[in-house]
Image (spheres, rainbow, N blue to C red):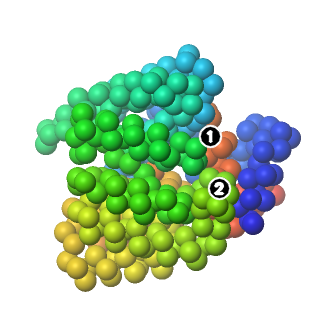
Amino acid sequence: MFREMILSVADNPLVAGTVKRYGLKLGASRFVAGEHVADAIAVTRQLQQEGIGVTLDHLGEGVSDAANADAACRSYLELLDALDREHLPGNVSVKLTMMGLAVDPALGFQNTRRVVERAAAMHGPEGPTGFVRIDMEDSPYTSDTIDVYRRLASEFSPERVGLVLQAYLYRTRDDLAALSDAPRRLRIVKGAYREPPALAYPIKADVDANYVRLVKQAVEAGHHVAVATHDELILRDLLQYFQAIRLPRDRYEFQMLYGIKLSVLRELARAGHATRVYVPYGQDWYAYFSRRLAERPANILFFGRALLRR
């Protein structure tokens, strides 16, 4: 109910216009690195100095024509070029609707392929550094997203391309089973889109339980698993599970969103676990920011305090 309420308010044109105009100054910058590539590069360097990896996301989704999809693709190519020049790993996350999937599935695939091809060409002193994580969006695109991922992973190898799976969808357990025909790099999230009860667990406790089941299912199937959650109880339980089965540390990593519980991630990094921060940037940040507010009441309180101080 909380998530539905916040997302409904966020759709209001007056609210959207006000937040888009003043939001970064009023506190949204806690969750978004900035609007430009240079902002993303600066945050990446800072986190890497702390021993924390980064995946960069140029914000945007649901483009309505081929020209905007091409522009989005070029923005990722420019980002990868910038990372290459700065000798930083080219780890990025891509939304297929930003690449044009909703305009034309063939266009979405071709644009995404251009990004993966550029990332796959990146090499550092110790070998390949480019990696593209294909984000999962709302349920109308789930099957198409998995299909695009399969084609690209087959062409460029699962080490160069990864996929996100959402724990709140009922279908994800079956999707994961179908994907377990080969070792893959999978990021497990709870899910933040507005979905009907016919497709997604409506109760948080059920989502949490399914999240833990999915991570264990992925580990048992031999995948590399990115545990992407801020839930400290789940983190503790899964860490105990990894230790109990003596899972090699190169088979998993802990991931969190920029601006949320980074102190917890820093503790995990200091303990020797692989960690990564999902760092978004770009001018089209409002939809992402709205979902972050909808996920946790604490985020609403933070933004509200910043608004009052302003």
Q: Is residue 45 left or right of residue 221?
A: right
Q: Residue at x 66, y 54 (%)?
A: 194
Residue at the extreme top of the image, as rendered: 67
Select label 1 or label 2 by which is in front. 2
- How far is the residue under mark 1 from the one under mark 2? 21 Å
Q: Which mark is residue 31?
A: none
Q: Residue at x 33, y 32 (%)?
A: 116
Q: For the residue carrying disc 1, how many other residues have a C-alpha within 10 Å: few (<14), some (14-19), or many (20+)?
A: many
What's the amino acid at mark 1? Trp
* Above/below status of 69 relative to 145: above
Q: Which residue is mark 1?
A: 285
Q: Residue at x 49, y 59 (%)?
A: 171
Residue at the extreme left of the image, as rendered: 126
Decide which of tag 1 and tag 2 comes sooner along the chain: 2
Mark 1 and mark 2 residues within 8 Å of each other at the beta carbon: no
> For numbered disc 1, what is the local secondary structure?
loop
What's the amino acid at mark 2? Glu
* Above/below status of 64 relative to 253: above
Q: Which residue is mark 2?
A: 195
Residue 212 lies in quadrant: bottom left
Q: Is residue 219 left or right of residue 296?
A: left
Q: Position of residue 129 (x, y in %)?
A: 24, 40
